[in-house]
Amino acid sequence: MRKPFIAGNWKMNLTDEEALKFVDQVVERVPSIESVDYAVCGQAVSLKDMKERAVGTNLQIGAQNVHEEEKGAFTGEISASALTSVGVKLAIIGHSERREYYNDTDERINLKVKTALNHGITPILCVGEQLEEREAGRAESVVRKQLEDALDGIEAGRAADIVIAYEPVWAIGTGKSSSPEDAGAMCGTIRRFLFDTYGPETAESIRIQYGGSVKPENIRSYMAEEDIDGALVGGASLDVDSYLSLIEETAK
Ligand code: PGA
């Protein structure tokens, strides 16, 4: 069965000192939970030290982005080899905030996913519709198209290493979470897409997270949905007690 995966997306929050203290506290307090995978995705400046402090523990450290090119004149960007050089093997790709503000198009996201996989970095590939698209009854077709584009040219053997995060844009950071039923239905649609594209084995093995105003109080209702295998959590991952509760609730 798929192992649940809780990933914290810290976005542009926490100083280096705060990030490292957080990692120390997590490492100290959850050494024994084996039934859930968990990660925090921090700001680039802290990743090396976060990783060092988490070595030998179950806490995974991830980045929030990776550039599609190997290296070069891309001021302000972060390369896959820079990430792996500090031991980081996880990266969020195509988050809606990057799609909106930083020109992460579907085509670019596809290249980023490929580059990440080439370097042994697990992408958390984000997809999700806007509110107007949901209201117009287009949510499913929008998400399918995002998947088609992002996974174009990626064969089943490599796709198995990807994690998909379904994040309806209107639910991110708004406190307006999707109902577990709607989120579960969309994750079912995503699984069917994976089945049609890659066949049963790969479709069954890929983990699909829900994201959008997930908190310790509602995580179990999402986890009860068959096709939801964890969560990508923003706001509620910034406080260590809340983050640990997310993991504990998922492990129940
Ligand atoms: P949120 O963010 O949990 O604060 O809604 C989720 C995300 O952006 O990944």
Image (cartoon, rainbow, N blue to C red):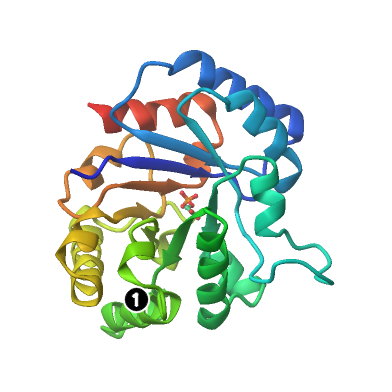
Q: Quadrant of the N terminus?
A: top left
The residue singled out by tag 1 in the image is 143
Residue at coordinates 64% horizontally, 47% vertically from top-left? 84
The answer to whether residue 67 is left or right of residue 74 is left
- Quadrant of the image occupied by residue 97: bottom right
- Residue 223 appears at what percent x and percent y? 23, 43
x then y, percent, for residue 151: 40, 75
Q: Is residue 13 above or below residue 241?
A: below
SS class, disc 1 = helix
Q: Residue at x 35, y 81 (%)?
A: 142
In x, y percent, where is residue 207?
30, 53
Which residue: 24% across, 47% down?
222
Front residue of this view, candidates 5 and 19: 5
Q: Is residue 245 visible?
A: yes
Residue type at tag 1: Val
For the residue pair 6 and 235, the one nearer the viewer reads as: 6
Q: Is residue 206 above or below residue 170?
A: above
Is 88 left, or right, of 224 in this rendering?
Answer: right
Does the rendering let one see residue 19?
Answer: no
